[in-house]
Amino acid sequence: MLFRQFVDDDLGCASYLVGDEQAGVAVVVDPAYAIERYLEQAERDGVRIVRTLETHTHADHVSGHGRLALEHESPVSIHPAAEPDYPYDALADGDELELGEVVVTVLHTPGHRPEHCAFAVADRSRAVEPWLVLTGDSLFVGDAARPDLAIDAHEGAEGLFSSLQRLLELEDGVEIYPGHVAGSLCGAGMSSKASSTIGFERRFNHALALGGVEDFVADSVRSVGVRPPNVAWIVGLNRGPFLGPPEPLPSLDTPGDARVLDVRPAEMFAAGHVAGALSVPLTSSAFGTKAGFLFAPEDALAIHAATPSDADEAGRRLQAVGLLRLAGSLDDPPTPERLEPIGLDELEQLLADGRVQLVDVRETDERDEGYIPGSRHVPYRLVGAFADELENGKPVVTICESGSRAGIAASVLAARGIDARPVLQGGIPGWAKRGGRLVEFRRCGS
């Protein structure tokens, strides 16, 4: 059996190449929009990609099934509950797809989405029982999927509970390979480990330890994370007519009417940037997700990168989250605007004098663990909506854990004409380490 796993470290998404090297055939499961990696691996392994299998219509990243179909005549298979607006072969529970000695069996596992399917994979040259199962967005390593992206969260959680029970009917030794690892917004408590076994998850996965459906539903609904604003857009792209290959990124002298996304390191942005540009460093974690919170799908974007290769990589990650209107890459533009980062020593003095307003731009669960007294809480992804309230005559200082989101938030405020200074080094952990006071949020009864 041929089995290859591909993990997108930026989005935490996993996709797979499965087939039979002797027979020279393979399928791609849940392909990303950047399909080159599958084609290159298939060529190295001496197999032909004969089909694309989708566990479901993805809501967090653009699928590559359209490119595989248009560019390589690879048919697409998905459960009909997805109601796709493209040619497809319908998957049904219990269907078997033969790839030489390898057999892929469809397990309909709704919950995350109504059409969701898992794929049990057996190698008949070894045994008829499944060797592994591709669980998509149902069972993760250390967690279960969120139930709220397609239907009512309670209804989704009930369906997901039943689907998980079905997966637990598999033998303990069956390996699980999920559709996401840590870093994805599709589950809060998943591990960064890329695989596990049914037996290990049966023993240690907290979502599987919730014995009854009522407890599982309550926990699932309570733990759903932030819903990205581009979910409906990405679902529409993945459900709609096939999406072809991206255009090459042209070089630009000026941004014209496009909005500028500066992907250089935060320190470079602070030293000089295009007027009105927003900063999301390419090196920050979940770059594509962060950009998706700041820009709308209809925005035309001009990328300001440190190198042409960085611009191309940024373009690929933006396309992965449905930001497809890329005007081009700025070639040595004028950078008249500046930001002045602030250190923790200076911040302490300014706070004591009451000369700045401090905005904690972390998420709620992070802030609850400890925040600087007197700080205001506005997550980085929402500061634009609160800009008018923050414009009160005092400079704004933004702070987070490491400096990444503080830099992003300061760039958003600066683009709105607000005097903003980010803490790029140290953040909340640095404040605590130097003896600064933190207040822990305590809920009733704790």
Image: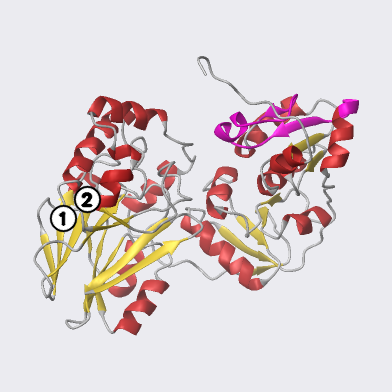
Q: Label 1, label 2: how many angstroms apart (C-alpha)?
A: 6 Å
Whole-percent x, y for residue 397 in the image: 78, 37
The residue labelled by disc 1 is 106
Q: How many marks?
A: 2
The residue labelled by disc 2 is 117
Occupied quadrant, residue 313:
bottom right
Callout 1 touching callout 2 (CB < 8 Å): yes
Occupied quadrant, residue 306:
bottom right
- Please give left or right for residue 66 compared with residue 83 in the image: right
Whole-percent x, y for residue 90 in the image: 16, 55
Whole-percent x, y for residue 257 in the image: 67, 53
- Please give left or right for residue 101 compared with residue 150 in the image: left
Whether residue 173 appears in this view of the structure is yes
Whole-percent x, y for residue 332 in the image: 77, 68
Classify 218 as above or below 322: above
Identified at 31% across, 82% down, the residue is 45
Q: Is residue 359 magenta?
A: yes
Indicate the amino acid at tag 2. Cys
Observer-nearest residue: 112 or 428?
A: 428
Classify 187 as above or below 387: below
Observer-nearest residue: 418 or 192?
A: 192
Identified at 48% across, 53% down, the residue is 321
Identified at 56% across, 43% down, the residue is 293
Q: Which residues are magenta?
A: 352-377
Whether residue 413 appears in this view of the structure is no
Label 1 packing within 10 angstroms: few (<14), some (14-19), many (20+):
many
Query: Secondary structure under badge 2?
Result: strand
Classify 249 as above or below 21: above
